[in-house]
Image: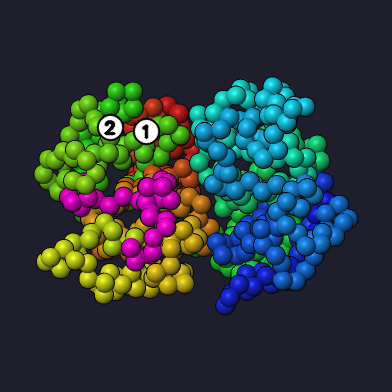
Amino acid sequence: MLKMNHISKSFPGVKALDDLSIELCDGDILGLVGENGAGKSTLMKILSGAYTLDEGEIIIDGEKIEHPTPALMIEKGVAVIYQELMLLPHFTVAENIYQNRYPTDKFGKIDFAKMKADAKEVLDRVNLPVDPGEFVGNLSVAKRQMVEIAKALSKNAKIIVLDEPTAVLADEELKTLFELVKSLSDQGISFVYISHRLKEIFELCNKVTIMKDGQLVENGMTKDYDTDKLVEKMVGRQMSDIYPSRDVKIGDVVLKVDGLTRQGVLDNVSLELHKGEVLGLAGLAGAGRTETLRAIIGADKIDSGKITLFGKECKFDNIKQALEAGFGIVPEERKVEGLQLNNSLVFNVSLPALPLYSNKFGKIIRKKETDAADKYIKLFNIRTPGRDANVKNLSGGNQQKVVLGKWIAADCKILLVDEPTRGVDVGSKREIYTILNSLLEQGLSIIMVSSELPELIGTCDRICVMNEGRITGELQKDEFSEETIMRYATM
């Protein structure tokens, strides 16, 4: 179906791809893995025609594609579905599927009835029971992804690239997506599946391509690998080294939450956080983990409950008051809530605590700002062209380091971290865990929400498990296991 032979691509000062080759057969589901910066996205942009290759060739169904362009690659059956979905929320499902190619009647007017009927056919093919006339903005993320796949099929796609498709999907939505991909694979459609979640690679993909620093490490059959071997090939270290050890003395209680209640969301949530401790919040989607963090810092109003911070009872009417009291927040959606994407790294680092970088007249002192940015670039090993680079151009792992840096620069004492390594490669994960350990050594305390049970087990000192807005179990370190956590998560 597809051969990409000896592909090379350079940007000013960087060789992004170096003599890399992959191939894809009819019905293959190829897992493309590697750390951020390995070249996965560059390779797929070359396949889509968005980037021109410097050297190499692309062959689809035995035909060498000369001068690939986005329009030509769509015509040849290539569709790329990015993590940030390219749908128009204020248009209907049918209008999105047939965007820029609406069917017309004999008078040249858009034939809405035909467009809806055609959309219904392709929606049935992906088993998505939505009205073609429904606005896309009213659909869940999972259903929007299905619309993207339906859109690709409406263009007779033979090769579909899924780039981090499961970052915000719940377990049932994930199951539905996997069933669809396998069904289409049985029909001869080939997939390239990019994900940092190695469990998904083993569950879904029959082949795997491992990349590192723009080069091919190896191609192989997924059944010939286990997680340890795959990680070692990707990052050059064993899986057991991903969670760095720490030796931090856990101190007195710094935060106490009693009976936090919000009708229909939280039910009498109580917990304690100690100095130097990582307290994990586990549970299935909708269990109330993120909502607990939001209630603590005043982002959501509560009906009842008491919060005691450093021995003093307090009530936050808004997030600003919580930040002033010493909280820092690493949100689940860092690109939406955690960063100013179109601004520089130095702007983002200084933003939460501008008075620290200003003179008595309120004017920002540029050198203080740049010194802070330079400090955290070096301390956290943030890979960036420079402090003035826009953070939207950084990888997911480096963006997360910027979010962490800004709260440390703001001198927070308690860090609330929601899905700290979502969309982050395994090598950058270790760097983030190392950063969190260093913060604990400085006396900070952390509450961590994560959907990855190995992450909670590898990083936390205690874990509170939630289900339907209440805490159903509290586990000490010697009680940790995925089975135990899941048992409490379904109680």
The residue positioned farthest toward the front in the image shown: 107
At 57% from the left and 35% from the top, the residue drawn is 144
Q: Disc count in the image?
A: 2
Foreground pick, 16 / 71? 71
**Rendered image quadrant of residue 359:** bottom left
| Mark 2 or mark 1, earlier in chain | 2
Amino acid identity at mark 1: Gly
Residue that mark 1 sits on: 288
Dividing the picture into quarters, in which one does residue 226 lie? bottom right
Give residue 213's mark. none
Q: As rendered, which of 115 and 342 lies closer to the eye?
A: 115
Label drawn at residue 269: 2
Residue depicted at 31% across the width and 41% down the height:
293
Residue at x 56%, y 65% (from the top left corner): 37
Position in image of residue 441 (x %, y %): 28, 63
Q: What quarter of the picture does the C terminus occupy? A: top left
User: Do residues under tags 2 and 1 come within 8 Å of each other at their CB atoms?
Assistant: yes
Give, as a single range, the part of the protein colored magenta.
322-347
Badge 1 local density, few (<14 within 10 Å), some, or many (20+)? Answer: many
